[in-house]
Amino acid sequence: MGEVSVPDVKGLDETSAINKLQDNGFKYSRDYANSDTVASGQVISQTPDAGAKAKKGDSISIVVSQGKAPVVVPNVVGKSETDARNELSGAGLTVTSVTKENSDTVAAGNVISQSIADGKYVDAGSNISLVISDGPKITYYKFSAKITAPADNDSVVGASIVLKDSNGAVLEQWNSIAIESFPYSIQKTDIAEMSSGKLEITWSLSDGTEQKQVQDVTFNKQ
């Protein structure tokens, strides 16, 4: 029996490739393999190659794609965002979304959770999202007050005001305020994690001396 040319079945889906071989008088054998470039179900290669001579009734071997090889998702919880991205990328995954949440247990900048559980097998190139810790939620406070001059203020020429937190650190100060500016309004916002402090007012007198007034104050949540 004479030889005929082997048909080209590369790139065909499995069923179409088999039908084409049989229509041309060939038998077939098949195997399966992963491929990063050939879609699942399509023929990656054939032996003999297309155009080669073979006898009708000979067996043509085809390799059918199973798509990209699955990859196992690593555990990146607790790792820094940079390390997590590098590890996921190295595993063949794509980080497509990063959101931030407060956490009392996970350090700021580290991963709280991942959208695909570790140990799961997924297609290479699969998208994964991360939730990154923004650290503990910070409570902010504010303070405002209207300062009035002393009742007997004939000798008062001005004042300086200092607002301190409960540890004595200066939060804000208002210097060299002329007595004509009183009543004088003060305001301070974004006081982190401090609910109280002290207000210190230093009154400047016309004879060059000073009188200091100190009072405990409470801050309000923003």
Image (tube, helix red, strand yellow):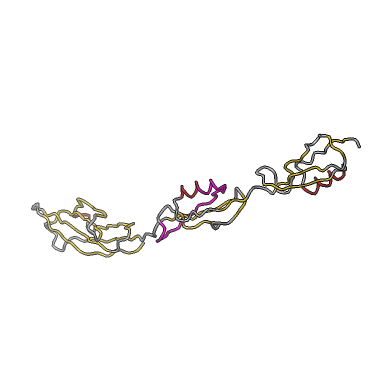
Q: Quadrant of residue 103?
A: bottom left
Indicate the position of residue 162 as horizontal and vertical percent values: 22, 56
Residue at point 84%, 47% (across, down): 19
With respect to residue 176, does 11 lie above or below?
above
Q: Quadrant of residue 141?
A: bottom left
- Looking at the image, the residue that sits furthest to the right is 1
Residue at point 67%, 42% (across, down): 37
Residue 103: in magenta span: yes
- Image quarter hosting the N terminus: top right
- The one of 122 and 196 positioned closer to us in this rendering: 122
- The one of 114 and 203 positioned closer to us in this rendering: 114
In the shown orientation, is residue 78 left or right of residue 148? right
- The one of 57 and 122 positioned closer to us in this rendering: 57
With respect to residue 51, does 213 lie above or below?
below
- Image quarter hosting the C terminus: bottom left
Q: Quadrant of residue 53?
A: top right
Residue at point 42%, 58% (across, down): 106
The span shown in magenta is 87-106
Indicate the position of residue 175 as horizontal and vertical percent values: 21, 51
Indicate the position of residue 193 as horizontal and vertical percent values: 32, 60
